[in-house]
Amino acid sequence: MTQRAYNFAAGPAALPESVLEQAQREMMALPGPKASILEISHRSPTFKEIIESAEKNIRTLLGISDDYAVLFLQGGGRLLFSMIPMNLLTKEQPSADYILTGTWGKAAIKEAKKLGSMKVAWDGADDKYTYTPADSDLELNPNAAFAHYTCNETIEGVQFPTEPQTGQVPLVCDASSDFMHKPLSVDRYGMIYACAQKNMGPAGVSIVVVRKDLLERSSDELGSYLNLKLHADEGSLMNTAPTFAIYVVRLVTDWLLNDIGGLEKMYAINQRKAKMLYEVLDQSGGFYEGHARQDSRSLMNVSFRLPSEELTTAFLKQSEAADLTSLAGHRSVGGVRASIYNAVPVAGVEALRDFMIDFRDKHAN
Amino acid sequence: MTQRAYNFAAGPAALPESVLEQAQREMMALPGPKASILEISHRSPTFKEIIESAEKNIRTLLGISDDYAVLFLQGGGRLLFSMIPMNLLTKEQPSADYILTGTWGKAAIKEAKKLGSMKVAWDGADDKYTYTPADSDLELNPNAAFAHYTCNETIEGVQFPTEPQTGQVPLVCDASSDFMHKPLSVDRYGMIYACAQKNMGPAGVSIVVVRKDLLERSSDELGSYLNLKLHADEGSLMNTAPTFAIYVVRLVTDWLLNDIGGLEKMYAINQRKAKMLYEVLDQSGGFYEGHARQDSRSLMNVSFRLPSEELTTAFLKQSEAADLTSLAGHRSVGGVRASIYNAVPVAGVEALRDFMIDFRDKHAN
């Protein structure tokens, strides 16, 4: 068998090894249909059980009430950036607020601007997107159709410690890169959405948790695939769902429930992993410089810089050789980024920690 | 290992066994990145090689020139039903023609109606969608932005023997259920699109072949994911592509090229398979009644009825028990449907043929 490295990719990202093993075992045929998960109808009883179990797992893990629909959609965050204003802006409430803490928030705003009035309620540009705002700094419009924020900026490694307070305005959260990393009070949100390829599964499916009353805003004039209410009415089976991706989400949520033991336990592990790496940064005498301010540090994406481009290149080359892979920062910002999502094992983070200490000892003045 | 049945599902549908075996072998880790295909970046060199090979295979199999872009998109035919008029209608040419030969054409029209003026150039409703029109029967608008048709209606089992002639009006073809079943003259088309889950791979990716000059029609005001030109400019990597689905498309197209030996050979096999089943229909003395007229019979979906509901139920139950699976007609029409896509082996069709003859001998008066 081909050897596996410790994978710190930002997404698509590491999956639990036991999930991959089960997908491998079952690839040729599932027992009931005697066909591969890749070959069975999205309307078959076997797949119905899979998608219902995936939804049930997500509901159990986050304690989601029946006031919310859970959807599985294609097109990633990018399509949702358009669909959200398409569905949630109304004639009575034609404007939305966006809180801007990094690259993905900017991408969401770009799409919203094409579709109606939107206002940036806070913009972290002046400090190069290194922290999240206090509630008192937000310039919120009390008549906004919704208020959008990105709870974890994958590229900058900036994470909200807790959700912003937006009063009666429904809070819409792009949780693509930290969904399910800790427990959430879903009832504080109008909508939470996340592409699967960070914490939940492979690329090709997004998970949307949306308060059902908000779905009444969806206009019949929308294209069917763009209509969130239709997706909810059809149980995410308006058309052929991305069956394999949803199957893997089911396996990952099984793992979270049964192997990890729920999101409180997952959160404790994630805190422990992040602490290991941030301690190396803090104790490096400035050799490793973190991007985010301490109070806004991400538990998922540890973004940092080395003193020079030469050292960065050497770091990436040597870590790769030590089977610590995909550590390059996003092409837009450079540096190093260790993505330590749920499925990255503690042993992998320990190995990276040791590598970082060793590398610093060899190269710091 | 779990036994595999002969799978006649309409989609998601049978895949070549060698493709599933390779996906299984490589599931835990690809040699280069030492990570699963599910875990690697869509921008990694490994995935770049995969998506480029998939595109190159498709170009080779169909002889596609550089005048056309080949795209890999999410959202299935349903999202494309909206995207096509969004991108191809213009101020100068605000109307499109739709040729209606069955259920999927109807679904495409439903979305087009929301987006502008459209005209039904032919409608097979009067004969219950049992045949395709002659060119002389089409009421085409010479100023239409495009003319849309469905080359194979999956549910009715009605297939165009050759593409309709639309003169200077760009022909747009929903080829979801017969793409790559035979060679095509791509230069007769403005655009051909197909979801993968019939002949090309798993659910979760669609393949679009589009003439590059048509992409100039896409407006900057469109949401980014809805803009075909942006997808072409970004090589289908505007955002995270459905990496695993594209990986399987690459394996399937490798199989078509190397194991089958190209589309001429695939076509000969498909003709042989379809002939076996249609002969049973024609020689059944009316016991099996095909839906489509002889000149419009699909090589991919053989739709037929039995003399009674009781016999249909018995047929489906006994075929399932004989490991000939997923033969029920679409829930909207009932009856029996044998989908015999590229990957359904000749041996499977032979087994079904024998079962059908035997069943008829036992139950016909």
Image: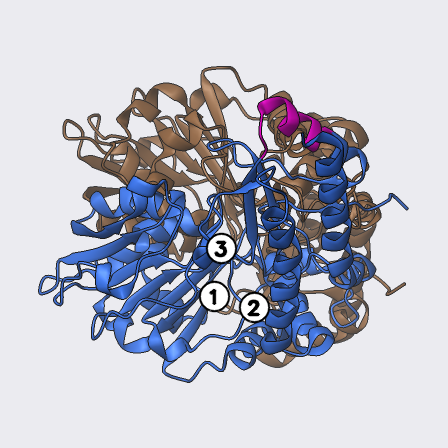
Chain colours: A blue, B brown
Question: Which comes sooner in the sequence, label 2 or label 3?
Answer: 2
Q: Residue A297 carries which label?
A: 3
Q: Mark 2 lies on which chain?
A: A
The residue range painted magenta reads: A306-317
Quadrant into which the C terminus of chain A falls: top right
Magenta stretch, main secondary structure class: helix
Task: Residue A188: give x, y in percent of width and height.
Answer: 34, 76
In the image, residue B239 above or below residue A121? above
How far apart are the two marked residues, 1 and 2, measured between alpha carbons? 8 Å
Residue B108 among magenta residues: no
Q: How crowded is mark 2: few (under 14 residues within 10 Å), some or many (20 or more)?
A: some
In the image, residue A210 above or below residue A358? below
**Name of the residue lying farthest toward the left:** A92
- Which of the pair A49/B260 is nearer the observer? A49
Q: How crowded is mark 1: few (under 14 residues within 10 Å), some or many (20 or more)?
A: some
Q: Going 35% across and 37% down the picture, which residue do you hit?
A: B148
The answer to whether mark 1 and mark 2 are in CB contact below 8 A is: yes
Q: Residue A237 carries which label?
A: 1
Say whether mark 2 and mark 1 are on the same chain: yes
- Which of the pair A131/B91 is nearer the observer? A131
How far apart are the two marked residues, 2 and 3, measured between alpha carbons? 43 Å
Q: Residue B166 carries which label?
A: none
